[in-house]
Amino acid sequence: MNVSRRDFLKVMAASGFVSGIPAAGQAAGARDKPFATVLDKALIAPIADDSTCERIAKAGFSGVELTKKGVSVAQALEGRRTAEKHGLRIHSLMGGGADFNNPDPEARRQSIETMKQRLQVAAAYGASTMLLVPCRVDDEVVPKPSQFRIEFDPRTLRITAVVEGDNKPFAAYIEAQNKATELTRDAVNQLIPTAALEGVIIALENVWNNLWVMPDFAAAFVRSFDSPWVKAYFDLGNHVRYTPTEQWLRTLGSSIVKLHIKDFKIDRTKKNDGDFVPLGKGSIDWKSVRGVIDEIGYNGWVTIEENSYTDAEYSGIMDRFFAGQDILRGGAV
């Protein structure tokens, strides 16, 4: 895709780089730290009011990701002013789940229009991204996380198999995945002009929606848009039950625009192959993950998406994670 100089500068600004200016939070002397990459910590909140922004800033965070839907552009501008007053950056808006694989064309159209409006709200907040979960598949028989072996056409992204051996039990799921990919590509392509106009990157997140669940397929899907306005919002804990977080990071690589952080403990005897647990108490090797984040050259926001510790405790955990240390001191916060 050809990108104009104007669009190039806008997307660089949205990612945190313009004319050599470092990413958010990167200061002079940052290269003297153990890692070349610089990370910024954020919390999630519904809105940016005085009490919320004061609480987050007091705990030592520099950013916030907002979740409330139905916010007007005027309200978003006010939220931005409030956040900036407290020295905070509203770096992202959770656009939420879309309905892009709905068989009803009118439902899909309405969902696309809703996401266009949320891109405008994200821009008013001053956010560089809008998180978007395109759709989900719930009714079909889906392989267990450890069973997945996806085979797909890299040109069309059509899946031909999801497990080794007999795929007949998953025929309906394969069809649903292929339809979801086709309809989502169409919908996101309709959103790209609005994203470019507003200067907000569409950050596709893969939650537990049974779609694009393996690194190579997810990366191919994001890159298929061939646009600087479509990137991946990767959650460091969501998909360790499919394959290690390090592999996800290496495969998605430069397609990643933002990171969420939570922890997951694998137990293949359980329904979901495990459970979400407090940070530092799961199956993820956080020292290794920090090294791979540096390896792929990711600079930017890491936002906590769990609620197990106090704000102050999370601030310390993030500082230790960023520094490549044990995130829990001796097993304690």
Image (cartoon, helix red, strand yellow):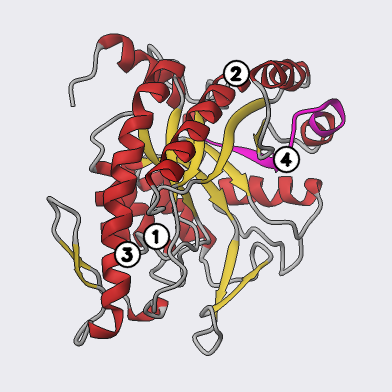
Q: From where the camera sits, is residue 251 visible?
A: no
Q: Secondary structure at mark 3?
A: helix
Where does the image place residue 205, in percent across and percent down from the top left? 46, 49
Q: Amino acid at mark 2?
A: Ala
Nearer the observer: mark 1 or 4; the answer is 4
Q: CA distance from mark 1 to mark 4?
A: 28 Å
* Label located before the other in sequence (2 or 4): 4
- Mark 1 burial class by Cα count in 10 Å: few <14, some 14-19, many 20+: some
Q: Nearer the viewer, residue 124 or 22?
A: 124
Query: Is the C-beta separation of discs 1 and 3 under 8 Å?
Result: no
Nearer the observer: mark 2 or 3; the answer is 3
Q: Amino acid at mark 1?
A: Glu
Q: For mark 2, what is the residue?
A: 124
Taking the spot 74% from the left edge, 56% from the top edge, the residue there is 307
Q: For mark 4, what is the residue?
A: 45
* The magenta segment: 34-53
User: From the viewer's perspective, is residue 275 above or below residue 260?
Assistant: below
Q: Is residue 73 left or right of residue 33?
A: right
> Which quadrant holds residue 278?
bottom right
Taking the spot 59% from the left edge, 64% from the top edge, the residue there is 263
Q: For mark 1, what is the residue?
A: 246
Q: Quadrant of the C terminus?
A: bottom right
Q: For mark 3, what is the residue?
A: 176
Q: Secondary structure at mark 4?
A: strand
Q: Amino acid at mark 3?
A: Ala
Q: CA distance from mark 2 to mark 4?
A: 17 Å
Q: Per the image, is 149 magenta?
A: no
- Mark 4 burial class by Cα count in 10 Å: few <14, some 14-19, many 20+: some
Q: Secondary structure at mark 2?
A: helix
